[in-house]
Amino acid sequence: MASKEPDPAADHVVLVCPSCGGKCRALAAAARKALRCPRCGAAIQPNSGSSQVTTIQPARSSSSGRVVRAVLLEETESTAYTARGPESTRPLEIPEPDPIEDIDVRRKRPPAPRAPLWSGVYDFPWHACALRAWFLFGIGLSLVALMGAGLSYVINLYNAGATGSMIFFRVFILFMKGFVLFFFWTGTYAGGFFLATIEDTAGGNPKVDWPDDSIWEKFLTFLYVCWIFLVSAIPLGIAASPLKPSLGFNIFAWSLVPSTIIVFPIVLMSALSNNSWGLLWNWEVLRHLLVRPHVLLLLYVMSALLLAPCLALGYLTIAEYSHFLFLAPLTGFVWSACLLIYGRLLGRVAWVVTGGHELAQREARPRRKRRR
């Protein structure tokens, strides 16, 4: 029997589980029925002598008469607390918008220069994105010029008929190995950056990213540029062949000058437009250039002005080595600067003739709001 009969007027009673000894709370109307302990799951019989019943008086409940599952009294007492307001509050901080998520800023094109064939072209080697390339290529090309002067010296001694021809031949092989090594090593990196300069500039980008190709891909890019230069030199070389009996083989060397100025830029832009080793001619590129004759004329004039100091310093350093060998560092850095300027110039020409510069200028103009 229970130690105490529950009061029917009370709302809740407290039952003691005979198995685990835990105290449970239940409705007074349901206390006469068999309940289950929420702690151990044992059945609680209020009429049995092992269970204890204690009456409590909580606030009135509107669900009188409905069977409710027993609740642990310890959990009810431990979770009861008095709600209090915070002692101090601070205003809600609104986070600043992430600039990456600003679509208008991200889609906005860089400002288009008013004079695209002048602004940012001839000082390009000393921009932050190209300064490293200019310095490294300058060192490599200085070594190429120095090895070329050594080859010229050995060849002149051999032609003079001096004694020890076998020694001169071995020295010639050593200088030739050094010349080929420095030439291909520098050209492998310079060729990739040269084409990257043309492509990024033609796309309207003011900065040029260093290409992340592998060493073999860069070497193939350098061979690609050499192949285009060789194909560009063939037409004028064939045209100058009738002058060989009177001028000798030097006529073929001199034919490289107009080939570099006139033919090479058109063939290079055509090959890049076709993205092919074999298709080296594109009539659309030629048509765009002929439609804008001032752009084509400026390209030829500036190409000649860039080629002139390169030829002059190369001749003085390699052919006149006895007096001007000290110019080898200057020659290498001038070659490096002219190469980067020429790549930037070709990229700007492609940007102008394809209409990219005009489109960038049109998008940079402030749009007028329409009146309703």
Image: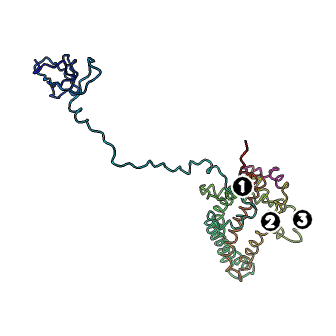
Of 191 and 111, the residue lying toward us? 111
Of 363 and 41, the residue lying toward us? 363
Label 3 to label 2: alpha-carbon separation? 16 Å
Label 3 to label 1: alpha-carbon separation? 39 Å
Q: Nearer the viewer, mark 1 or mark 2?
A: 1
Could you say which quadrant of the image residue 201 lies in? bottom right
Asked if labels 1 and 3 touch by Cβ distance under 8 angstroms, the answer is: no
Exactly how many numbered labels are in the figure?
3
Asked if labels 2 and 3 touch by Cβ distance under 8 angstroms, the answer is: no
Q: Is residue 265 above or below residue 95?
A: below
Q: Is residue 209 above or below residue 23?
A: below
Q: In the figure, is residue 220 to the left or right of 116? A: left
Q: Is residue 94 above or below residue 227?
A: above
Q: Which residue is mark 3?
A: 242
- Residue 154 image position (x, y, % from top left): 69, 77
Please tell me whether mark 2 sits on a helix, a strand or a loop.
Answer: helix
Q: Which residue is mark 1?
A: 202
| Amino acid type indicated by mark 3 | Pro
Q: Nearer the viewer, mark 3 or mark 1?
A: 1
- Residue 142 image position (x, y, % from top left): 65, 72
Q: In the figure, is residue 298 to the left or right of 36? A: right
- Residue 300 image position (x, y, % from top left): 81, 64
Could you say which quadrant of the image residue 11 lies in? top left
Residue 256's disc number: 2
Magenta segment: 274-289
Q: Residue at x 26, y 19 (%)?
A: 64
Q: Residue at x 48, y 48 (%)?
A: 94
